[in-house]
Amino acid sequence: MVRRIIAALLLAFSVTPAQAQAPAASPGPSFACTAGQGGIEAVICASPTLSAADREMAALYAVSKVSAFGSGPSNQLEDQREAVKAMQACARPSGRTSIAACLQGAYDERNKDLAIAAATRAPDLALPVIRRLDPAFAPVVEAVVLWSSEPDGADWSAPVRAGKRARIVGLLQPVLQDFLTQQDPQFARGMLDSATGEGAVKRAEDLLTSPDRFVGFLNVLGPSLAGDGSVGSREMPCAAIVAHPGLLKATDSVYGATPDNFVFNTDCRASLPPLPLLTALDGKVWKTWPMCDGTIRFATYRQYRSTVDEARLGLAGHDPKAVLPAVRGVAWRDISAARGELAAYYVRYLGRTQAQASQMATDALAAMLNAAHECD
């Protein structure tokens, strides 16, 4: 039964992107409903709402199976397996939650993540999902998708971009207004000025006068964005960052305290090709991180996470003085294995020579490990 459920719920990975965006031929889920089915399959098949969520997951999953680089597989298969495990666990829900409600929550969480991953490639499919599941974040994601669809340094005053400009301004003006008025106005204005320039941003139009202003606003926005606590982590689409690497700065530590927990993240681990050895190394770093006191620790945690994203994206800077440090609880063989994996990855997906890739891998791990286990 378990294998059959896994096979059914992973069926979406065989769907092509063209099929994914075509109208559903059946009101049922993405897998076949047959007589005698039991467990969670039967619950899904009996529910039009859950069947629709399953079809939605299948469509989004198919679009997201190619990596944010535009070639090679994404790492979504790993997350899909975890989502299936969460659905299987719904067969034994708590006394306060029905199987159907448990499944709906699992589908909502997975479909929101997949919609972020698919937002740049299939906005007509993905954005309605984000609007339904996280309406406060939806205008931000759509604005990022539109902004990143134009080249770096694009002139947003040019007539050719008038339509996109108007849409971005319309999306972000209410968000900017809320940011400046729904918390301490003096603090909000100070954070915005620090991120974008003294008095530089008064209206949403001002965000399009330079990339730094657009990215700076995104960087400070996360902690004040409305939400009921059920939306989980809010992530920038990695494909947008691949197109505009400067967007990664929107995920940097900026508050230097607890609010850094709510600064936007990225979905690069899931949307870029698998790096299992780097992931394992990252897990060992977190497992052995010493207990830190004070809220400043959240800034150091975020700074470290940024270096992991830089490694996945191939964006780590070169520091000729940087060395690979020893990190407590992390074996040198783990570091060496991750370095070899990263070098091969840079050759394959970023077109670097072996020599270039080897240096990039060393730079990436030096940045990552030098940021590890910091507390202040």
Image: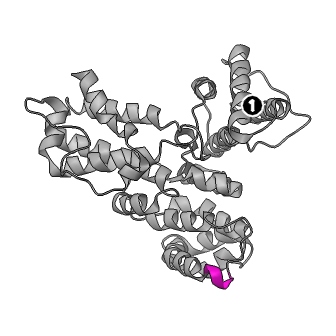
Q: Is residue 102 found left or right of 298 in the rendered image?
A: left
Magenta segment: does it hold 159? Answer: yes
The residue lying at 40 percent from left, 49 percent from top is 60
Q: Is residue 226 found left or right of 329 in the rendered image?
A: left
Residue 247 drawn at (x, y percent): 66, 57
Q: Write down the quadrant of residue 295 in the picture.
A: top right
Secondary element under disc 1, as helix, strand or loop, is helix
Work out which residue is located at the far right of the displayed protein and give it.
320
Residue 266 drawn at (x, y percent): 57, 48
Residue 248 visible in the picture: yes
Residue corresponding to mark 1: 365
Dot 1 alpha-carbon crowd within 10 angstroms: few under 14, some 14 to 19, many 20 or more: many
The residue lying at 78 percent from left, 32 percent from top is 366
Residue 329 drawn at (x, y percent): 66, 17
Q: Is residue 359 above or below residue 65?
A: above
The residue lying at 35 percent from left, 40 percent from top is 12
Residue 263 drawn at (x, y percent): 57, 54
- Of residue 213 and residue 229, the one placed in the foreground of this image is 213
Which region of the structure is painted magenta?
157-161
Q: Write down the quadrant of residue 269 in the picture.
A: top right
| Amino acid at circle 1 | Leu
